[in-house]
Image: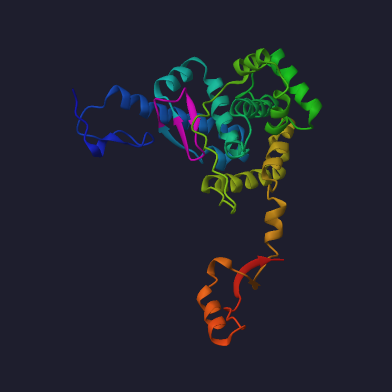
């Protein structure tokens, strides 16, 4: 049995192994997995120059609990043995899987669930991303289009102009359990269990999570790159452009919009809880019919 010190327990899979003890098989797999992801990322960058920031935004981290790939918007978690096996058997599918996970972040699917059903939302996000990948006319991610996919894309497009996550969710809500199971088998790609949980509802405005802000900037730059490199993106990038544009659209509520015009001021109001009966009774006892009432208090409020 080889003892591992605390300093050696966690390591960066992107760096070469450096230790006085022999490298274990698990550590070798994790290191090789990091190198495989670097190779995949480099190959995708050659085909999709406008994805330079997006492809390198996630930090690879080995994790035995995920299927092959999973993300939380900050790290790219991979199961080393499954990743190496997939790279050996079907490297083109690994290209799609990597790009699929990145597109979830670009379209901000991780933070837009709200009160929607988790199962339907996960499936809707997978359908939206796979539609973009299927529309990209690049050999590195191209695959045969099955009848199930063609039918799903056509049905969602008939209800909404863009095959995005929200229209797909509305379409899925009207499907039977049998069709949902068929669609899950067809479109399931990456693991969504690490997606951020919904924040509890609070009356005040919740701050935007830092990863979401980061991907907002990446999405805005990506939209600019797509506009500048229109010919390089190709004819099949129309679905990608539409979804990136929709993801970059402001989702600020009307209440937040009005809050920008509010000013702070003092207003007079009664505070029954703070009313002191001692002054009231003292005034009656001294002056007869003239009670002493404490002055009205004021409070700060924000109003238009």
Quick one: quadrant of the N terminus?
top left
**The image quarter in which residue 124 lies:** top right
> In front here: 116 or 37?
116
Q: Is residue 69 magenta?
A: yes
Residue 103 x/y as whole percent: 60, 34
Q: Position of residue 212 (x, y in %)?
A: 56, 45
Q: Residue furthest right?
A: 158
Q: Residue at x 62, y 36 (%)?
A: 115
Side of 35 relative to 268 (left or right):
left
Report the front residue among 56 and 197. 197
Q: Residue at x 66, y 25 (%)?
A: 127
Which of 73 and 124 lies nearest the eye of the viewer? Answer: 124
Q: Residue 203's spot in the image, x, y percent?
A: 60, 52
Point out the residue furthest to the bottom here. 287
Task: Give the extent of the magenta segment.
Answer: 62-77
Residue 108 lies, with reference to residue 98, above or below; the image says: below
Residue 171 falls left or right of residue 33: right
The residue lying at 60 percent from left, 28 percent from top is 122
Query: For the image shown, how many numbered marks are present on the structure?
Result: 0
Q: Is residue 217 above or below residue 3?
A: below
Q: Is residue 215 above or below residue 172?
A: below
The quadrant the C terminus occupies is: bottom right
- Position of residue 221 measured from the top left corner of the image (x, y, whole percent): 63, 47
């Amino acid at each position: 049995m080889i003892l591992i010190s605390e300093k050696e327990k966690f390591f960066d899979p992107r760096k070469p192994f450096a230790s006085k003890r022999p490298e274990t098989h698990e550590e070798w797999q994790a290191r090789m997995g990091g190198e495989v992801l670097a190779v995949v990322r480099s190959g995708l960058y050659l085909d999709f120059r406008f994805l330079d920031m997006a492809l390198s935004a996630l930090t690879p981290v080995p994790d035995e609990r995920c299927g092959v790939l999973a993300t939380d918007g900050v790290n790219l978690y991979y199961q080393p043995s499954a990743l190496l096996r997939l790279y050996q058997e079907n490297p083109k599918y690994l290209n799609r899987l990597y790009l699929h996970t990145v597109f979830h972040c670009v379209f901000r699917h991780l933070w837009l669930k709200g009160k929607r059903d988790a199962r339907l939302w996960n499936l809707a996000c997978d359908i939206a991303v796979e539609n973009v990948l299927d529309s990209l006319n690049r050999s590195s991610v191209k695959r045969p289009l099955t009848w199930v996919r063609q039918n799903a894309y056509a049905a969602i497009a008939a209800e909404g102009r863009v095959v995005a996550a929200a229209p797909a969710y509305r379409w899925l809500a009207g499907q039977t359990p049998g069709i949902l199971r068929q669609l899950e088998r067809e479109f399931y790609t990456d693991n969504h269990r690490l997606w951020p949980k919904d924040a509890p509802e609070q009356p005040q405005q919740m701050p935007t999570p830092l990863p979401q802000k980061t991907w907002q900037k990446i999405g805005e730059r990506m939209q600019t790159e797509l506009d500048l490199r229109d010919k390089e993106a190709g004819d099949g990038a129309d679905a990608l452009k539409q979804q990136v544009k929709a993801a970059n659209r402001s989702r600020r509520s009307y209440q937040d919009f009005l809050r920008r015009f509010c000013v702070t001021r003092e207003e007079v109001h009664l505070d029954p809880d703070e009313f002191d009966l001692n002054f009231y009774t003292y005034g009656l006892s001294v002056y007869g019919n003239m009670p002493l009432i404490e002055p009205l208090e004021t409070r700060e409020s924000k109003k238009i």
